[in-house]
Each structure stands twice: as structure tokens, then as C-alpha cells.
Image (cartoon, coloured by chain):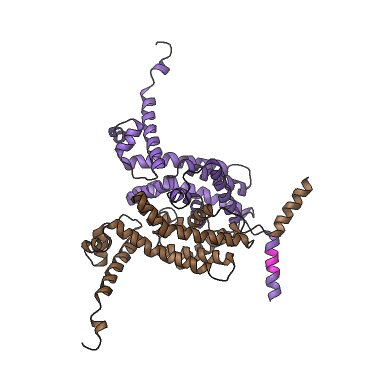
Chain colours: A brown, B purple
Amino acid sequence: MHGEPSLSAPSTALVRRDVREELLEAASALMTERDTLDLSLIDIGERAGANTAMVKYYFGNKEGLFVALLERDAQHTLEQLLRLLSMTIDPAEKMRRHLNGMLRTYFHRPYINRLLLQVLHHQSQERRQEIVDRFTRPLTEAYRQLIDEGVAAGLFRPLDPMFLYFQAVGICEQLFSARILLPTVFKVEQFDRSQQERFIAQTIDIFMAGIARTPPSAAEARSKALAADR
Amino acid sequence: MHGEPSLSAPSTALVRRDVREELLEAASALMTERDTLDLSLIDIGERAGANTAMVKYYFGNKEGLFVALLERDAQHTLEQLLRLLSMTIDPAEKMRRHLNGMLRTYFHRPYINRLLLQVLHHQSQERRQEIVDRFTRPLTEAYRQLIDEGVAAGLFRPLDPMFLYFQAVGICEQLFSARILLPTVFKVEQFDRSQQERFIAQTIDIFMAGIARTPPSAAEARSKALAADR
């Protein structure tokens, strides 16, 4: 028992982090499975094999746990976007990869967008601003930078980046927040891997064609037609 | 008093319909103002100048009122789409007008999409299917017909109409369901008329360019390049 203390006796810090992460993962799994944010502390505790006192210990209350879950999930998306921005590939390719990453994140964590909105709605004005400053603003600023790059490179049409933020999130996200319609309206019980890939491809295709600068040939044709009209 | 009974003494049926509609309108106004579906019967009754017994009389309970509100709002969107389908204009123009109508509906009733999803979540399997059959399926079927027309006319690329339904709703709707981000992230306190028109124009432009068939010239250029590569 003497030779490998780190295996047989994990440090308290390690145990602590594990329970905390298991609680987050339990909330994440339940939100995904049940397609709702309406969970009780008892449900979350049971799934994580912990009692509700642990939730209170680590997060204060359910809202605290939700903010921590948002932090965990948003972190990932933001890091992905910042990594993309630092790469030396063209802005259209960056946007394509960003959409791809966002769509794949939604497949794993279809609740993220709703979680953000619910957390914001349930917080005080002050706390709300704090959450937005931590998660959402850095993301929208990175996003604006990506758009600016694309417009500057002549790859994207001049577009309002604030509008475009909502349009991009919406075109990627609606399938996930409205997925109760898949079995009820469309008789799709389970999205298989090939459907998933086709959905990702179609979303990226539509969005990229939608924001692309009108090709020079078409723009020239139009200005010639206008000139001929005069 | 004798000559104009219909003005001085409205029929009971007329009074009844008015209270019912006022309750629906009160719920609609509160959902819009407060940006939440989390209303109490007391709030709704107060706004309508009626008591909660009236809600119970007309709708059974709050869920009943929500379904009736959904019916009122969905009816309008469905009628608009069916009218469009019957017109003798090209499918791209139909799609443009459909998106325009949908976006304007969201400006007036930004809660509609969330209302549909919440109502579906809170109903039994059986009742859920009934609601979907009444509101959502006719809409998605009309939508599929519009896509098929556009593909057949060579105006739209071949696209999965189920995916496209979610993509269209999402690109139009996200700004409204996430409008808590407008003041907090983007420092926009109120959307003015000109912003509204610019948002509508940008959304329609992106979506229409996104679904348009690749113009023949570009397709030819690509197949030539492929041939040269061989």
C-alpha cells in the first residue's frame, strides 16, 4: 500500500473536483435526455450519486449549478472560436469551421442556448450583466472580428454583425431547441449519424452561400444591366 | 332605445367573444412585454379586466388558454402561407414573401415559437399529437410544397425540406427568443423601425442566396475545373 499513494489515496482536491464535475455532467445529461431545463436538485443528485447537500456545497443552489454548467460549456465554444481566429486560413474557412464546431456542440449539448437564456432571465440585472460580460460578450466580439475579417478580405458581403450573430445561432440551433417536433411532426425518432452529417453540411452550405460576396461576374453583369437601363 | 337594439344591447354571444379575445390578447401582450411565458392567471385576468374565473370558464386552465393563443396565432401564419402557395408568382418570390410575413409576425408576437414548444412539452403524448396535427403539420406540409416548387422550377438547390424548415424558422426567430441579449450584450435598448427593416432585409437576403441554385456559369466553371484536374 506504501508504494503508490496517489492511486490508492486520491487527494481531497481531486475527489472534490470529481463530485463537482459529476454534478455538472448529471445536469447536462438530464437536460439532454429529457429535453427540458426543468430539473430538481433531487434528480441531479441521484444521477450523480450524490445528495442535494453536495449541490448546495459546491454551487449554493440550482441556479448556481446552472451558471457553472453554462461556464463549462461556453468556455469550450469560446476557446474554439479564439483558436480559429488566430489561425492563418482565410476568413471563409474560419467561418465554415466555426459553424461546424457550433453545430457539433449543439449535437452533444442541445440545451446550451436555452440554458443561457433561462439563466439570464432568472438573474438580477447586475448578475445578468456579469454573466453576459463573462460568457456572451467575448463570444460576440470574436464573432464580430471574424465577420470584419471576411468583409475586409472581400469574401463576405457587408453585413450587420449583430444581426448575423442571431442569424448564425438561429440557423444552427433551432433543430435542437425544437427537437420535440422531430418525432411528433416529422416521424423521426432518432437522428442517425448520416442525418447529422447531412444537417451540418446543409446548414454550412446555406449560411456560407448566404453571406458570400456576390461573385464579381454577377456584380458586373448587374452593373452593366443598370448602365444599359440608363 | 327602441330603434337600435343592436348598438345599445349587444348580444350575449358578442360579449362572450370579446372577453375571450381580451384574455388571449392580455396573455399575448404580457408575454411580449415581459419576454417570458411564465405568467399567472391573476396577471392575465388583471390585464384583461376580468377575474380568473373567466379564464377557467373559457379555457379550463392556463394551459387551455395557451393552446387557444397558439391556435389564434398559428392560424394567421398558416393562412398566409396557403394564400401564397395559391398565387401565380415564382416560388422564389413566394419564399421571400413567406419569410417576410414570418419575420413581421415575430416582431408582433415574439413568443410564438417558444409558446408552441412549451405547450407541446406540457401535454400528454396524445394531446401533443393532436396539437401538432392541427397547427404544425399543415404548416410544415405547405412549407415542403413551397420547397418542392422551387426545386422543380430550378430556382432552389435540392435541399432537405425538413432540415430547411428548422433552418428557416431559426434564422428568422433567434433574435426574438434571445432578445434579452439586445440590451445586455449589444446595448440596444429598443429596436427601431429602420433596424427592423434592415434585419428583415438581411435575413431574407442571406436565406434566399443560401438556398438558390448555383448559377449555371459557376457550376460550369466548377465542372470545367474538375475536368481539367483529371
Drawn side of residue B105 relative to residue B220, left or right: left
Residue A58 versus residue A178 in the image, above or below: below
Q: Is residue B220 magenta?
A: yes
Residue B49 versus residue A23 in the image, above or below: above
Drawn side of residue B87 relative to residue B124, left or right: right
Residue B174 in view in this figure: yes
| The residue positioned farthest toward the top in the image shown | B2
| The residue positioned farthest toward the bottom in the image shown | A3
Depth check: give the residue in front, A136 or A218.
Answer: A136
Residue A136 placement (x, y as % from top left): 44, 58
Q: Main secondary structure of the magenta part?
A: helix
Depth check: give the residue in front, A213 or A137.
Answer: A137
Residue B180 versus residue A194 in the image, above or below: above
Residue A27 placement (x, y as % from top left): 31, 62
Residue A34, picture quadrant = bottom left
Residue B37 placement (x, y as % from top left): 36, 45
Drawn side of residue B65 relative to residue B81, left or right: left
The residue drawn where x is 34% and y is 59% is A67
The residue drawn where x is 51% and y is 57% is A168
Q: Locate the C terminus of chain B by quadrant.
A: bottom right
Q: Is residue A91 magenta?
A: no
Q: Locate the N terminus of chain B by quadrant.
A: top left
Residue A14 placement (x, y as % from top left): 28, 74
Depth check: give the residue in front, A145 or B219.
Answer: A145
Number of labels in the image equals 0
* Residue range corresponding to the magenta coloring: B219-224
Residue A188 in view in this figure: no
Residue A62 versus residue B190 in the image, above or below: below
